[in-house]
Image (cartoon, rainbow, N blue to C red):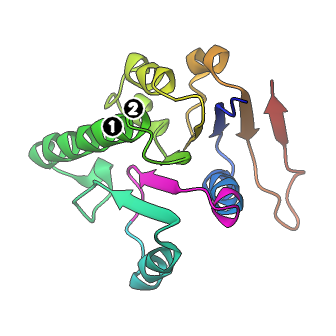
Amino acid sequence: MSRRYIHIFCGTGEGKTSAALGKGLREASEGKSVVLIQFLKERQSGESMDFFKRLEPEIKLFRFQKFPENYENLTEREKEDEIQNIKNGLNFAKKVLVTEECDVLILDEILGLTDKGIVRFEELHSLIDAVGDDTELYLTGTSRCEALWPYVDEVTELNTSYRAGSNISIDKTIE
């Protein structure tokens, strides 16, 4: 029985990465292999990286970003270099999917690459097309990337986060 499954976690609210990681942790606890590739994420502390190292070999973390600064703060030359690093990450993700190197692939903050003009819709659609019959793919990011919705199984949009004294949170799943 096929368990191919593709889920987008998008929106401006908090918890997209946490939700995708939670799915990955659940699968890893059942003996599945998980690959997490992060795009344009802030540098993590040594403690965070040590934690991910302890999760290996079930969960492997990859980052192709080289500069510690936010993408928006880079010089044009540095942005060009970083775009090449990101493209290397995309190629790695496609290789992982085509060769079925993992059961679960999490592409963290990949959706935001479209807003920055780094990745085109067609490139993300190509990744979705490469998902095998026994693979789960989770894509996260602030961008809604609605053009991808017809090609995925589920979309969860997190619009706001509840904080004491603030408005009610709005979380919804779009099918």
Q: Which residue is mark 1?
A: 95
Disc 2, disc 1: CB below 8 Å?
yes
Residue at x 23%, y 42% (from the top left corner):
88
Left or right, 62 with respect to 105, comes to left
Quadrant where the C terminus lies? top right
The verdict on residue 39 being magenta is yes
Alpha carbon distance from label 2 to label 1: 5 Å
Residue at x 49%, y 80% (from the top left corner):
54
Residue 5 location, x and y as percent? 66, 33
**Among all residues in the image, which is located at the extreme front?**
1
What span is in magenta?
A: 27-42
Identify the amino acid type marked 2: Val
Q: How many marks?
A: 2
SS at badge 1? helix
Residue 40 location, x and y as percent? 38, 51
Near mark 1 (Cα within 10 A), the count class, few <14, some 14-19 or many ≥20, is some
Q: Quadrant of residue 136?
A: top right
Residue 3 location, x and y as percent? 69, 34
Q: Is residue 129 above or below residue 70?
A: above
Q: Quadrant of residue 97?
A: top left
Left or right, 11 with respect to 127, comes to right
Residue 98 location, x and y as percent? 39, 32
- The foreground one among 113 and 152 is 152
Q: Is residue 2 above or below residue 107?
A: above
Quadrant where the N terminus lies? top right
Identify the amino acid type marked 1: Lys
SS at badge 2? helix
Q: Which residue is mark 2?
A: 98
Near mark 2 (Cα within 10 A), the count class, few <14, some 14-19 or many ≥20, is some
